Image (cartoon, grey):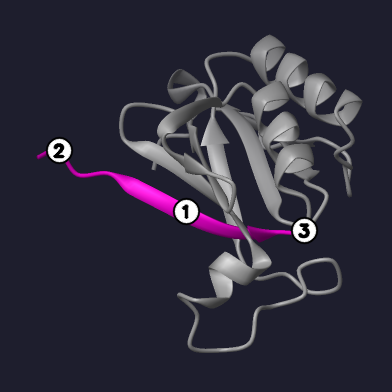
Amino acid sequence: MAKQVFINLPVNDLQKSMDFYTALGFTNNPRFSDDTGKCMVWSESIFVMLLTREKFATFATKPIADTKSGLAGLFSLSVESVAEMDKMMEAGLQAGGTEPNEIRDYGFMQQRTIEDFDGHTWEIFFMDMSKIPAE
């Protein structure tokens, strides 16, 4: 079996969150979804599990972080171009996400940040490997 990454996120409104992630370009895998969780597919090996807070709590051994007021993690998604990054961000903003800071340009990489309804923070970036400074 190929190695895969599953990111599990607690959400307050499962349908609203699923709609937001769909707007970002994720697709739903109904085989691993039910009324307590939705499996959202980014690629063949990267998945985001949106879980109701109640369902998430069954897996947790610590209190669930309040990601609206504190940062619990930064998740980054690469895209093929700045235009794709901007299109993805605009779709996410139209779906109700927020952009907490302006675009960052590192010369070889442009990066934008979007937060979902629950405050989960995603970095959307394009990296041009030909512009990485030589050591």
Give the Cα distance between marks 3 and 2.
31 Å
Which residue is tagged 2?
2
Residue 79 falls in image quadrant? top right
The residue under the point 72% across, 69% down is: 71
Q: Which dot, 3 or 2, sits closer to the camera?
A: 3
Q: Which residues are magenta?
A: 1-11
- Residue density around tag 2, few if under 14, some if 14–19, many if 20 or more, within 10 Å: few
Q: Quadrant of residue 106?
A: top right
- Residue 65 in picture, x, y percent from top left: 69, 78
Between marks 3 and 1 in the image, the one whose residue lies nearer the viewer: 3
- Residue picked out by circle 1: 7
Between the C-alphas of marks 1 and 2, the distance is: 16 Å
Secondary structure under badge 1? strand
Q: Is residue 130 left or right of residue 89?
A: left
Overall secondary structure of the magenta stretch? Answer: strand
Check whether the beta carbons of the residues at disc 3 and disc 1 lie within 8 A of each other.
no
Q: Is residue 27 left or right of residue 99?
A: left
- Taking 55 as reference, is 128 above or below it? above
Tell me the amino acid under the disc marked 3.
Answer: Asn
Q: Nearer the viewer, residue 56 or 127?
A: 56
